[in-house]
Amino acid sequence: MNKLILTFLISCFIITTMHAQKSQNSDIPKLKKWSIATYLSLYAFGGPRKQLEDQMIRYGFYDPGSGRDSPYSTGPMTTFMMSAKYYLKSPFSIGIVGGITFLGTTHGPVPEDANLQISYRVRYIAIIFSYNLYDILSIGIGPSGYFTKAWESSHSFERIDAKYYHTKVGFIIDFGFRIPRKTRFFGELNVQYKYVGKVDIGPFYVNPDHDPLPQITVKYNHLTICPGFGLRF
C-alpha cells in the first residue's frame, strides 16, 4: 500500500511537469523554472500527545507519589523535509515534498516504579499546487500520503515490543516565504498544516502487574514551521 501511494504521487508530479514543459511561459526566466530546497525544524504543534495524556489518566497511568502526578510529554518534535518545485504558467507552480516528523514521546508513570513511554512519528509525501507572488510568497494545497508509527519506547516489559503502523491519505496546506528573490541560492521559512486523520494505536504494556493501555484512537494532524535553504536553476 505504501509503495502504491508513493508511485501514484510521483507519477502525478512527473506527468504534470512534462505537460507544463510543453506549454511553458517564455516570460519566466529559465533560471527560475526549477527549485529544490531542504528544511529542518526542532518543533511542531499538534499530534497525538494531548490525547495520549488524557487516555493515560483514564486508564490509571499516573503515580501521585512519583513527583509527577499525571502523564506528560517531551520532545524534541523534529522535522526534516525536502522539496522540489516547478513553475507552470505564472503565477502557478507544482511541487513534490516529502519528509519525516518526530512528534514526541508521552510518559505515563505508574505506582509499580515503572513508566510507560509511547513515541510517535509520521513520514509523508505530497503533491502541492501553489500560487506564487514574485517567487517570494506562496500558498499551496495538495493530496498527501502519510505513514504513521507509534511504539512503546521504554522497554520496561520484555514480553511485549508494541509497534503500530498505518497508511493514511490526507492533504497538506503549505505557506512559504523566500528571500532573496533573484538569486541562485535562497533562504525560506515554510509553514505546513498536515491533515493526517485518526489512527488506532495500542494496546501498550508497562509491566505484568499493571493493566495495559488498551487500543485508543488519536489524531496525527499537526503543524510545522521549518527554516531551510535552496537552489534555483
Image (cartoon, rainbow, N blue to C red):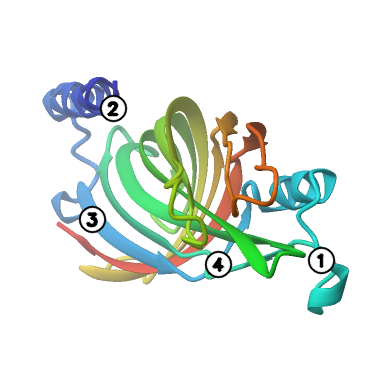
Lateral position of residue 49 relative to residue 190, left or right: right
Q: What amino acid is at disc 3?
A: Ile
SS label for mark 3: strand
Report the Cα–Cα distance between label 3 and label 2.
24 Å
Q: Which of the two discs, 1 and 4, sits closer to the camera?
A: 1
Q: What x and y, as percent, mark residue 161?
A: 42, 47
Report the Cα–Cα distance between label 1 and label 2.
40 Å
10 Å crowding of disc 2: few (<14), some (14-19), many (20+):
few
What label sits on residue 36 in the rendered view? 3
Q: What x and y, as percent, mark residue 103?
A: 53, 56
10 Å crowding of disc 1: few (<14), some (14-19), many (20+):
many
10 Å crowding of disc 3: few (<14), some (14-19), many (20+):
some
Report the Cα–Cα distance between label 3 and label 4.
22 Å
Q: Residue at x 57, y 44 (%)?
A: 204
Counting residues from the start of the chain, the first of labels 2 and 4 encountered is 2
Q: Which residue is mark 2?
A: 2
What label sits on residue 63 in the rendered view? 1
Q: Which residue is mark 4?
A: 43
Q: Nearer the viewer, residue 192 or 71?
A: 71
User: Could you tell me how many numbered marks the image carries?
Assistant: 4
Q: Nearer the viewer, residue 229 or 91?
A: 229
Q: What amino acid is at disc 2?
A: Asn
Q: Which of the two discs, 3 and 4, sits closer to the camera?
A: 4
Q: Is the Cβ of the residue at disc 2 closer than 8 Å to that at disc 4? A: no
Counting residues from the start of the chain, the first of labels 3 and 4 encountered is 3
Report the Cα–Cα distance between label 1 and label 3.
49 Å
Report the Cα–Cα distance between label 1 and label 4.
28 Å
Q: Residue at x 34, y 56 (%)?
A: 81
Q: Which of the two discs, 2 and 4, sits closer to the camera?
A: 2
